[in-house]
Amino acid sequence: MAVRRFPLWSILILLAVGVAACWAFAVRYDQQARRTLIEDKREDVSSQARAQLRLLESELQKFRLIPVVLGEYSDLRDALRSGRADMALNDKLALLTGKTGAAAIFILDATGRTIAASNARNPDSFVGQNYAFRPYYQLGWRDGGGEYFALGTVSRRPGLYLARRVDGRDGPMGVIVVKVEFDAIERAWADGRTWTFVADQNGILLLSSDPARRFLALKPVSPALRRQIQDALQFGGAPLTPVGLTLNPDGSARLRGGGEAIVADMPAPVRGWRLYEVAPIGDALAGVSQRTRIATMLFAIFLALLGAILGWFMARRRRAVRDRERLEREVALRTEALGHEMEARSRADRRYRQAREELAHANRLGTLGTISAGVAHEINQPVAAIRTFAENAGLFLEREKPEQASANLREIVAMTDRIGSITAQLRRFARRGVGEIGPVPLVQAIEGVRLLIADRFRGAGVRLTLPDVDPGVKVRAGRVRLEQVLINLLNNALDAVSGQPDAWVMVTLTDEGDRLYLDVRDSGPGIDPASRDDLFMPFATSKPGGLGLGLHIARDIMVEFGGALDLVSDELHTVFRMTLVKA
């Protein structure tokens, strides 16, 4: 039998179909690969942006309390009334600057003149300088407080100025200014492979992981705005030229030179600021293009082989028709099975990505909730103690007892250090990585609690009894956190007995071998049996406005010490037992 031959036009049609199939495959493969890459990159960039934002928020949180605390300093108010300050106040500001990491702390009188500063002993001292023209003074004096980013007129270093007005009986007295610099934050941002920066409401880059791009602009700056910035000396002689980044509404961007990037942005913890995370994807897209070319070549080879096989079989004699048709059916079945398998794998991959994203989202929400609620709850007692010491210092000064006033002021400084320790401890607790644990003299913790809580008990008319402890007894704990657990229990007991006649709260100590038991007992009505099971659960509270985190955090702290915190059965009273391990 003669061999069947194909005309030239049919071969050309087959070639055209093959080329069209290769082109369609390449386009579809490239689009899918690019879409997957961009989605994965966008999630990674958003996660990184949230991490960088939390770092910035935690840095600012510790500095915003400084003006509030300083406003209660009696010697600061005396300096504002008299118009001048002695060197002791300057030294206190310098000490506070060193302990908190602030760049500078200075006090302005009603005219904007600096009367005290943390750098008073330095050649570039702010004392005597008038900053009435600076917007941060105007915000503080006019609105009671404000935040303003600018270059220092003396140091020429950029920073955020936190201003707060000091009010007296006869009206405003002056403004407290704390300057915060972000060199450490920018260095931490620079460790990543992305570009992180913060821009203000005018689009000017204030902070940047690439310092060379600081004070550039996201968009051209108008002449009127440029004159306003230059008149305020906000950025010195910075040219404010465009940074070369074009932002698109879909979260993509184009870099100077034409490179593509993914951008995530979110509000920063200062009014008008936004944090941007920029991840170039030019190299990744180039890799996608290369993979597309390789896949297209393989697909073309596959088509060519398939065409050769089909041509060879169709050129065979009629006796090979049945074998050829059987082979084609097998190829079709295998192709269909491969399609089903690819579709199943694609669905499984989508389910995996969705589950991973939901788990990460839940974990982030839980961590942020623990940190924000814990800090708000745990620093309440030290702040109240600072106010008490400040009021007592004022009374001592009025009675001309400077030694006692000075002692109270030293305690205030110690309390500010304690606030820093508490906030640091709570941040570490949220990451399951809290502070150091070691031998702690129990008498020091008891005395610290007495110092913090006794005045409140006396003011409420409740009798507080604390145990006498041998100075040589030490327990395995961290002193600040041990005090916080005991203070939390005492505050709860005080709330329980408030308003009752002959109310009392008693702490007893029991020594049993290698363990100590501290029992906190009160004369209150007891705890509702229905709420006992949920007592230590997070966000479970019976107090109006309470967060429900105190006992939960306290129990976790005690467990970390190797001990325990339990509600002990007692028919007459409410008893919480702290179990401590001897050191």
Image: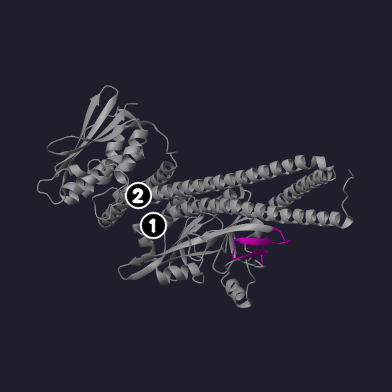
- Crowding at label 2, few (<14), some or many (≥20) Cα neighbours within 10 Å? some
The magenta stretch is 242-259
Q: Secondary structure at mark 2?
A: loop
Q: Count the marks: how many?
A: 2
Q: Is residue 112 visible?
A: no
Q: Name the amino acid type tagged 1.
A: Leu
Residue extending farthest front: 1
* Location of residue 568 in the rendering, given as x and y in whole percent from the top left corner: 20, 34
* Location of residue 306 in the rendering, given as x and y in whole percent from the top left corner: 78, 45
Q: Is residue 90 left or right of residue 507?
A: right
State the residue in front, 388 or 553. 553
* Location of residue 85 in the rendering, given as x and y in whole percent from the top left corner: 42, 60
Task: Identify the residue at horizontal 60%, vertical 45% (top origin).
Answer: 340
Q: Is residue 460 left or right of residue 513?
A: left
Q: Is residue 142 visible?
A: yes
State the residue in front, 213 or 464. 213
Q: Is residue 110 above or below residue 102?
A: below
Q: Is residue 107 above or below residue 518?
A: below
Q: Main secondary structure of the magenta part?
A: loop
| Marked residue nearer the N-terminal end (1 or 2) | 1
Which-is-in-front pick, marks 1 and 2? 2
- Crowding at label 1, few (<14), some or many (≥20) Cα neighbours within 10 Å? many
Quadrant including the N terminus: top right
State the residue in front, 455 or 356. 356
Task: Identify the residue at horizontal 58%, vertical 71% (top origin).
Answer: 229
Q: Which mark is residue 379?
A: 2
Look at the image and say whether residue 274 sits in the magenta stretch: no
Q: Which mark is residue 70?
A: 1
Distance Cα–Cα, label 1 vs label 2? 17 Å
**The quarter of the displayed image where residue 533 is located:** top left
